[in-house]
Amino acid sequence: MEPAAQDCHQPIVQIKDVSFHYRDQQVIKDLNFTIKERDFVGIVGSNGAGKTTLLRMIVGLLPAAEGTIELFGQPIRKFQDWERIGYVPQKNAFNPLFPATVREVVMSGLYNRKKMFRRLSRLDHQKCEDALEVMRIQDIADKRIGALSGGQQQRVFLARALINRPDLLILDEPTIGIDAETQAGFFELITHMHAHHHMTFLMVTHDLDMVKDYLGESPVSQNGKIQFFVRHSHEIENCVEVDLQHSLV
Amino acid sequence: MLDILLSDFFQRALIGGVLIGITAPLIGIFLVLRRLSMIGDTLSHVTIAGVALGFLIEVYPLAAGLVFAVLASFAIEKLRKAYKSYAELSIAIIMSGGVALASLFFTLGMGYNTDVMSYLFGSIYTLDSTDIYMVGGVTVVVIAVVVMFFKEFFLLSFEEDAASVSGLPVKWMNMIITVLTALVVSTAIKIVGALLVSALLTIPVAISLLLARSFRSSIVLSVIISEIAVIGGLMLAGVFNLAPGATIVLLLISLLIITLVGKKGFTT
């Protein structure tokens, strides 16, 4: 288990006594859960288990009926640092006939409240080119998003989520509707990113098989039909390494 | 033939038409992409109610129509929130409310029926200088707001959840688009008529969606298509003595058919 006394990683998401119900149906009851810096959390459950509801509450799209949620130590209602969060939506969250190129979609990762009324700078364009390069999608940058395969589309959304170099990356059923081989490749990519970059991951999925190799066979906790699988930050770096990073910064 | 094209009333019609030819697809693209194509139709029916009231109480009809359209746009947003899963319900309710009010005002002021008819089917040749100033003002406002919020409107239309997660004020931006739609619709009805206004909002966009690869190019293309239809339609109507609003819309539909056929020819 997590050695709390010596853990030097800061809490990124804190869920305290959160409950949610749709009319008479209780979906989440008295949920308490903390995601710390560099954790990789898998929220797993079948359709209708409430995992997307929970995700929507964490990013402020739905208010919790009871309890509180904090992001980076701030109550969700007051939270403003949205560029610290990268968000990869479900594949079916957008209209495939939308007339947008890969570059336009990746660039939209920069459009947040702080950028309102501001023109995009040369640095912003460079960030976009870097994100395209990291995801190896430069060669399809001028193609229409709807013309790509499911796997390519998910790389585009991952590039959009990474353009701000976020501290927290949220993935909502990122591999739904994608063939098994591409799914495995995509999961390998994000676990590689988790191991090598200073980022916290929160992934919602219905596919237990995909996560258990990386996050372990058994959940660390459960609420209703939702299970939480975690690869803790201290499993990939210790506090000496964290102190060293801080001193270098 | 040239006499008509050079006449004052035709020149005013051309100026008004060219301005609406810019604003209608500029707003229309955000409506089409957010699956709200019918909102233009709804607001135009409500505008007619305002126009009828304007005649009844002797206020500049287009201004009364504009106020009605803006109020209706607020009501649509409120109803959309009340019936989240049934966005089209708000459109149906407000449209029938607009038609009901319009017919009520029609019957209260029997004497002006012919004037109101010109707003139903458009009467671009009767544009006066006040109308031109109003269309011009709306054009400036629409272009300024779209340029100012271009990237935010893009994200809102592409994926509303991502816009929320980016901290954008989604509620306010939805409201701004709806109010701009009300402005465009209420000024466009004198040009193509309330019954045809949604054609100008949606058909140029429908054509551009078939041809454009990027968002930016689909906006530019929809404005070009709209201008071809407005200018071409006015010329044809002037020369052959046809109803201008109807000619513009039928020209747009012809362009859509040609594009569909041409695209099929290329892809098969």
Image (cartoon, helix red, strand yellow):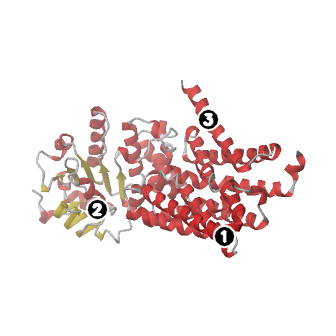
Q: Amino acid at mark 3?
A: Ile
**Left-right relation of A218 to B180:** left
Where B214 sits versus A57, above or below? above
In three-dimensional space, the C-alpha distance between marks 2 and 1, rounded to whole angstroms, equals 54 Å
Q: Which residue is mark 3?
A: B257
Q: Whole-Å distance between the Cαs marked 3 and 2?
A: 46 Å
Residue ID at (28%, 69%):
A73
Q: Secondary structure at mark 1?
A: loop
For mark 2, give the secondary structure: helix
Q: Residues within 10 Å of mark 3 (few under 14, many from 20)?
A: few
Q: Amino acid at mark 2?
A: Met
Residue topped by disc 2:
A57
CB atoms of marks 1 and 3 within 8 Å: no
List x then y, in percent, for residue B234. 76, 48
Q: Are marks 2 and 1 on the same chain?
A: no
The part of the image, by quadrant, that contains residue A165 is: bottom left
Pointer 1 and pointer 3 on the same chain: yes
Name the kind of residue labelled 1 in the image: Gly
Check the residue under mark 1 and report the chain it is in.
Answer: B
